[in-house]
Image: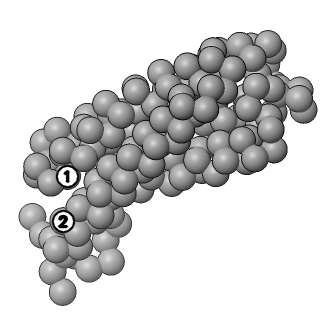
Amino acid sequence: MMQEKGKLPTKMVCLSFTSLSLTYSIMLIGVYITSSHQGLSCPDWPLCPNGFDLPSSKYFFEHFHRLLVLITSCFIFATAIYSIRKPRQIKNPAVIAGIIVVVQILLGMFVVNSKLQAVIVAGHLGTGMILFAMLLLTFIYSYKQWKNNIKV
């Protein structure tokens, strides 16, 4: 069934764009945390000392970063699962992103537990860039497919 012009984007386009946007937001917050030397403001992993409570100002950005990672991971996994029945060019980067996000979370744990060892921090940053690239490809390919299915 062809979509009419002006119709809302498909779930795949919305999921991939949301995952991409949230990942970019996490990257910006991570850069802020690093540049403001707050990388170990939350020395425990996965939760800050206040647990699930509202964070104090001392832990705010790190707590928010970790909470946003949890939400974003759910969107990335949903995107990967939803892409299983899509064409290969959409499915492959989405599934790779689902795998990379697990690696990225583990690297985040190692960053905290290693007290910001430079090599692990660099690996965390590099893996984040690869994750962003996979999500960008997923969005671009799903958007192209949606756009090509619209009849003018």
Can you identify the residue that label 1 sits on? Answer: 90
Residue at image location 25% in from the left, 59% down from the top: 142
Foreground residue among 90 and 35: 35
Residue at image location 40% in from the left, 26% down from the top: 102
Q: Where residue 93 sits in the image (x, y, percent)?
A: 24, 47
Q: Where residue 59 sits in the image (x, y, percent)?
A: 82, 28
- 47 to the left or right of 108: right
Question: Callout 2: 10 Å neighbours few (<14), some, many (20+)?
Answer: some
Residue at image location 35% in from the left, 66% down from the top: 8
> Going from the N terminus, do you reach mark 2 or mark 1 first?
1
Residue 145 got which mark?
Answer: 2
Mark 2 and mark 1 in contact? Answer it, CB < 8 Å: yes
Question: Callout 1: 10 Å neighbours few (<14), some, many (20+)?
Answer: many
Element marked by disc 1: helix
Foreground residue among 152 and 125: 125
- 93 to the left or right of 25: left
Q: Nearer the viewer, mark 2 or mark 1?
A: 1
Residue at image location 54% in from the left, 52% down from the top: 24
- State the count of labels: 2
- Which of the 4 image quarters holds residue 117? top right
Element marked by disc 2: helix
- 64 to the left or right of 11: right
Q: Is residue 94 visible?
A: yes
**Amino acid tagged 2:** Gln
- Quick one: quadrant of the N terminus? bottom left
